Image (spheres, rainbow, N blue to C red):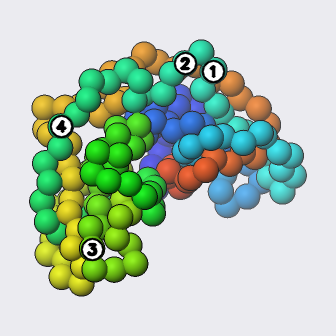
């Protein structure tokens, strides 16, 4: 759980490269928490069991990946995890997964190459990427952006947000239970 206000949740959304987030204000045990969405953000729907708002970046603001230079990656055999899982089961080759990682602003990803039902899929990590560990049940690699490359959020201008009462969902959920208040 992270503590923060509206502005801190917006900053976290920018850091994650999210397409929007929901912030619960009052009326449930989710109050004060933000839920970050990825992918295409669907229209806001009515939500009556508590008071919540959908925040979405203004349409003229671009996602972080559009403001960054291409990152280079190291590739090490094994498994690695981050603080959060940004996206699972993305099908692609090494280059397609690197491009998706840049788009998501991920801190690294695992690509399974052979030996399981997960072959050909990538798993994108957020937050601090932990050291690579041995993995023997299939062949997989941990891809980590080079240390001199910065995540997309560091290359973008601040985005403005609209705030609409209700619930909204994206294609993926980037981060849950980010705590904040209205300040």
Q: Which of label 3 and label 1 is nearer to you?
A: 3
Direction from residue 96 to residue 14 in the image, left or right:
right
Q: Nearer the viewer, mark 4 or mark 1?
A: 4
Tell me if I can see residue 89 in this picture: yes
* Disc ID at residue 114: 3
Quadrant occupied by the C terminus: top right
- Distance from disc 4 to disc 2, alpha carbons, whole Å, reads 25 Å
Q: Earlier in the sequence, mark 2 or mark 3?
A: 2
Residue located 45% across and 36% down the image: 17
149 lies above or below 133: above
Q: Between residue 112 and residue 109, name the one nearer to us.
A: 112
Could you say where residue 24 lies in the image, as x and y percent from the top left?
A: 68, 47
Q: Earlier in the sequence, mark 4 or mark 1?
A: 1
Q: Looking at the image, is mark 4 or mark 2 nearer the viewer?
A: 4
Disc 1: CA contacts within 10 A as few (<14), some (14-19) or many (>=20): some
Label 2, on which residue? Answer: 61
Q: Earlier in the sequence, mark 4 or mark 3?
A: 4
Snapshot quadrant of residue 90: bottom left
Tags 4 and 2 in contact by the CB under 8 Å rule? no
Does residue 32 appear anywhere in the picture?
Answer: no
Vertical placement of 22 versus 6: above or below? Answer: below
Return the residue at label 1. Answer: 58
Residue 106 pos. (x, y %) = 34, 45
Secondary structure at numbered mark 2: loop
Whether pointer 1 and pointer 2 mark residues with C-beta atoms closer than 8 Å, the reply is yes
Q: Secondary structure at mark 3?
A: strand
The residue under label 4 is 72
């Amino acid at each position: 759980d992270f503590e923060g206000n509206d502005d801190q949740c917006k900053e976290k959304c920018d850091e994650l490269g999210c397409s929007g987030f929901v912030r619960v204000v009052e009326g449930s045990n989710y109050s004060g928490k933000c839920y970050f969405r990825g992918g295409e953000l669907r229209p806001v729907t009515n939500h009556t069991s508590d008071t919540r708002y959908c925040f979405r970046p203004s349409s003229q603001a671009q996602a972080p990946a559009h403001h960054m230079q291409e990152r280079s990656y190291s590739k090490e055999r094994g498994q690695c995890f981050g603080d959060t899982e940004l996206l699972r089961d993305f099908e692609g080759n090494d280059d397609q997964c690197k491009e998706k990682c840049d788009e998501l602003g991920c801190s690294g990803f695992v690509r399974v190459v052979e030996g399981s039902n997960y072959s050909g899929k990538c798993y994108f990590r957020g937050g601090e990427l932990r050291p690579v560990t041995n993995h023997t049940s299939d062949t997989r690699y941990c891809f980590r952006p080079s240390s001199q490359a910065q995540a997309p959020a560091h290359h973008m201008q601040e985005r403005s947000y609209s705030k609409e009462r209700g619930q909204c969902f994206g294609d993926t959920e980037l981060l849950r239970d980010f705590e904040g208040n209205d300040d």
